[in-house]
Structures are given as structure tokens and as C-alpha cells.
Amino acid sequence: MRVYVDVNVLYYFFTANEEFGERAENLIEKYSGDMVTSALTVWQLYILFRRQKRKLSLTDILSELGIEIVPLTIEILRSAEQCKKLDLEDAIHYSTMKAYGVTTILSNDRDFDKVEVKRVF
């Protein structure tokens, strides 16, 4: 079973977040090889780390963690724009999940409880 990994789980993992880092690490270890995320996630991580002036090879690291990066397509964007329950960024993640038949998301974001997915954190 493939799961979608949200940007917050990866950020907690990469930064060894004091409160959520261990939980994020456990989830990444548990689902390694079965995770998928949007190219949007890579961009979001890039922005977050750029603010901290940290340089990471995100594509290499995500690949090593067993995370498949899928494209953000015009169809996914159109679907996201129709989603009224989530902000655009979350709607893009949700629409990506739907496009790839993924029904479970690893996320600390309770906004995903508003839509029909299983949120694990």
C-alpha cells in the first residue's frame, strides 16, 4: 500500500524537530519504499531550507528514503482549484493523492481530516 508523505513530516525529519522529529522518523522508516509525494513538496522543502540557508540535495535524499516524487500536472492543478475544503497547497497534495490512487497521508496537518483520506501521524 502506497502512502502520501506531506511536507511537514519531511521537514520534521530533516530538522530533527524536538517535538515531532522522532515520530516523523518512525513513519518514514515504517513506510520507506511505499511513499509518494508531489514535486510541490520538493519545492516547499527547498523554500524552507533556503530560509535557513541550508543546502541539501533533496532529490537524492528523498530517493534514498524511498519516496517517489510525482509530477504536478495541469489536471492535478485543475482538480485542486475545485477543492473548496482545503487551501490550494493542501488541495494540490490531496489532488495528487487522488490522481495516484493513494488514500492515506502521513501528515501532522489536521486540515486533511476535512477530506476523505486516512491521516496518519
Image (cartoon, rainbow, N blue to C red):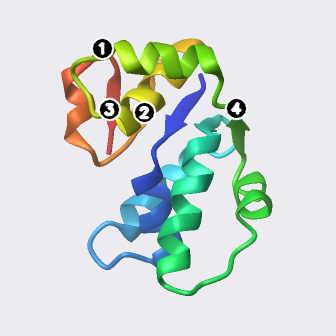
Marks 2/3 in contact by CB < 8 Å: the verdict is yes
What SS does tag 2 mark? Answer: strand
Local crowd size for mark 3, using a 10 Å CA cut-off: few (<14), some (14–19), many (≥20) = some
Task: Say which amino acid is labelled 1.
Answer: Glu
Q: Which mark lies nearer to you, 4 or 3? A: 4
Task: Say which amino acid is labelled 4.
Answer: Pro
Residue 21 place in picture, x, y as percent: 39, 69
Q: Which circle's residue, 1 or 4, is located before the other in the chain?
A: 4
Note whether residue 29 is visible: no
Real-space CA distance between mark 1 and mark 2, rounded to the nearest whole angstrom: 11 Å
Q: Which circle's residue, 1 or 2, is located before the other in the chain?
A: 2
Above or below 73: residue 43: below
> Which quadrant of the figure contains the N terminus?
top right
Residue 115 place in picture, x, y as percent: 26, 18
Q: Name the residue under label 4.
A: 71
Q: Nearer the viewer, residue 56 or 50?
A: 50
Real-space CA distance between mark 4 and mark 2, rounded to the nearest whole angstrom: 17 Å
What SS does tag 4 mark? Answer: loop
Disc number placed over residue 116 in the picture, else none: 1
Above or below 54: residue 8: above
Above or below 18: residue 118: above
Task: Say which amino acid is labelled 2.
Answer: Ile
Note whether residue 52 is visible: yes
What SS does tag 1 mark? Answer: loop
Disc number placed over residue 7 in the picture, else none: none
Q: Name the residue under label 3.
A: 119
